[in-house]
Amino acid sequence: MIDAADLTLDELRIALAPAIADSAIFDGWTQAALLSAAEMEGVNPALARLAYKSSGRQTGTMAMVAAWIESIDMAMQRDLSAEALAGRKIRDKIRDLVLYRLDAVAGQEEAMRRALAIGSMPQNLRASMRGAWNSADIMWRLAGDTATDYNHYTKRAILASLYSATLLVWIDDESEDKAETRAFLDRRIDNVMQFEKTKAQFLGGSDRESFSPVRMLGRLRYPAA
């Protein structure tokens, strides 16, 4: 149960999101799911609706999806802090972070499938890309990344792509303990590590400022309002 009396509307939006995801398995990301979640968590339905109307850039179904992703980001930061991951290799940190996100939504595959469909709609693509970038940025920061040059952007773009691809495998994975997803993730991480090694060798003596796609990726981090 959620004690809404002590929460701001933004805090309530995040707190209610996991329960909406549970309802979205059956009702989709709809007002029916929102009201069902509010009833389940003991929140006044009018207050729940107000929280999502006051959610900023997103509206309607995308506001619910974005809040769910943000709630996963916050839980990940709480449970897998940089201190908790200290001492592990970068590839193992990234693997732990991606698997944490997948384990956090275990049993909610249908809700995630519907959320991805909503995020792929033309009117929601910008918000969806911003959310993917933010999640990748959080994961890299938890992994200890401090890059501020072109690597900052390429790492986040690559991780966002890796996570999205793994998520698509995970949704339809019926193997025991999602073994196929874990194997897929390991292969993708191996590929990325090899790519990073090759890229470092290739760009070692080049003029990095001439790599124009970096400026394009930077726009994902700081999109125009």
Image: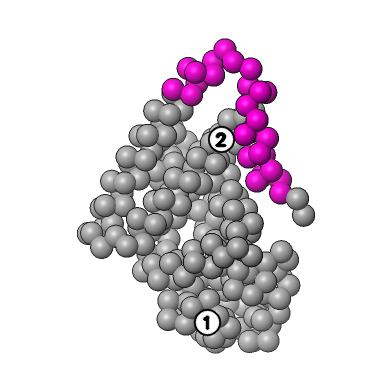
Secondary structure at numbered mark 2: helix
Q: Is residue 218 magenta?
A: yes
Q: Front-most of 73 and 85?
A: 73
- Does 34 appear above or below 10? below
**Farthest-out residue, front:** 122
Tell me the amino acid under the disc marked 2: Thr
Q: Front-most of 93 and 153?
A: 153
Residue 132, percent from left and from top: 56, 52
Applied colour scheme: one colour
Residue drawn at x 71%, y 64% as measured from the top left: 57
Residue drawn at x 40%, y 71% as measured from the top left: 110
- Real-space Cα distance between discs 1 and 2? 37 Å
Residue drawn at x 63%, y 21% as measured from the top left: 208
Residue drawn at x 46%, y 28% as measured from the top left: 196
Residue 29, percent from left and from top: 53, 76
- Does 184 appear above or below 214? below
Q: Residues within 10 Å of mark 2 (few under 14, many from 20)?
A: some
Mark seen at residue 33: 1
Q: Main secondary structure of the magenta part?
A: helix
Q: Is residue 77 magenta?
A: no
Residue placed under numbered mark 2 in the picture: 154
Report the magenta residues as a range: 198-223
The answer, for residue 167, to whether it is visible in the render is yes
Tell me the amino acid under the disc marked 1: Ala
Q: Front-most of 206 and 173?
A: 206
